[in-house]
Amino acid sequence: MHLTELQLRDWSKIDVRFYTDDASDLTCLTILVIKYVGVYRWGSEGYPDAVYMRAMAKAGLDAFNPWCVIYDLSELSYAWGNNINEVFPNVDIKPPSVPIAVVLGPNCEPGMPHLYSLLATDEYVDRGEFVYFRRLDFAWKYVSARFADSEKKL
């Protein structure tokens, strides 16, 4: 029997990076930023990109177990693809188990036609389980406030 090695990295050229603030304790992470850098392929050709991005996000969520998540697409080029929403693994839970925000950049925002109203504002667009921002600092304040509100309810 001959085995062929499989590498998730072979699925996509998109780089996935994980960040938090300097004050965070890795054993008790408050906010995790999952940043995607690169080019998401057009249409159904982007399916492997979505699979890879989601798998990496799940690994980060499992490893760091954050209380809040920001998906940062500010350096992702995205024009069109049916699977982009599958990149966010914890938003298919209603309501999401942790506060979530998505940061968009100039090379992916126009490809998301359901966000045309964001083009008219510098603040945010709330689409239920997704809240979209243009700036990471706004997204950080948003998830921090949502987390503080949830702490008050406990």
Image (cartoon, rainbow, N blue to C red):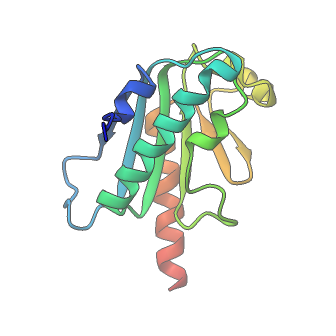
Q: Residue at x 60, y 23 (%)?
A: 46
Q: Quadrant of the N terminus?
A: top left
Residue 153 image offset from top left, x and y in percent: 55, 82
Compared with 118, 88 (above or below) is below
Residue 80 in sight in this render = no
In the displayed structure image, the side of residue 130 where residue 30 appears, left or right: left
Residue 96 image offset from top left, x and y in percent: 61, 63
Residue 88 image offset from top left, x and y in percent: 56, 46
Residue that lies at the very extreme toward the front in this rendered image: 1
Compared with 153, 14 (above or below) is above
Camera-side residue of 124 and 16: 16
In the displayed structure image, the side of residue 44 where residue 149 appears, left or right: left
Residue 90 in sight in this render = yes
Camera-side residue of 121 and 103: 103
How many marks the image carries: the answer is: 0
Q: Residue at x 54, y 59 (%)?
A: 99
In the displayed structure image, the side of residue 117 where residue 28 appears, left or right: left
Residue 128 image offset from top left, x and y in percent: 74, 53
Q: Residue at x 60, y 18 (%)?
A: 78
Compared with 39, 8 (above or below) is below
Q: Quadrant of residue 23?
A: bottom left
In the displayed structure image, the side of residue 1 where residue 90 appears, left or right: right
Q: Residue at x 60, y 19 (%)?
A: 108
